[in-house]
Image: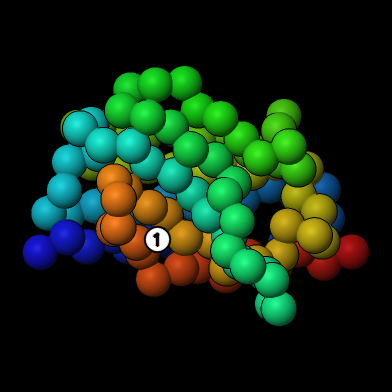
Amino acid sequence: QVQLVESGGGSVQAGGSMRLSCVASGIRLSFNAVGWYRQAPGKQRELVAHSLSEGKAVYADSVKGRFTLSRDNPKNMMYLQMIGLKPEDTAVYYCNVGVDAWGQGTQVTVSS
């Protein structure tokens, strides 16, 4: 059974930093594309960062230079390091592996 569990969300002031983690079971990150998505209230889910298997990550324009996707294949974990957070980054963040494996989401709230 495939399971993804995010952690690391919370509240932070604008300009702050946060790291999200996602641990996977039942699926190998090293063999799959991985990504982070987010959904703000009243908005559609949007791509934040994405990486093909062992490939270079690509980022949404809104987070380029501030967010970094990484993965630890032996631990079967992926991360999203976020710096310079802005109030508009407030959303529920989801990790994704492969075609249809999703975590339950973790709330990130950035206050001004």
Q: Nearer the viewer, residue 16 or 101?
A: 101
- Whether residue 11 appears in this view of the structure is no
- Whether residue 103 appears in this view of the structure is yes
Q: Is residue 26 left or right of residue 101?
A: left
Q: Is residue 42 left or right of residue 92?
A: right
Q: Position of residue 37 (x, y in %)?
A: 53, 54
Label 1 Cα crowd, 10 Å radius (few <14 / some 14-19 / many 20+): many
Residue occupying image coordinates x 30% and y 50%: 99
27 shown above or below 64: below
Label 1 element class: strand
Q: Nearer the viewer, residue 23 or 96?
A: 96
Residue occupying image coordinates x 89% and y 64%: 112
Q: Quadrant of residue 43?
A: bottom right
Q: Quadrant of residue 66?
A: top right
Task: Specify the amino acid type for callout 1.
Answer: Glu
| Mark 1 lies on residue | 6
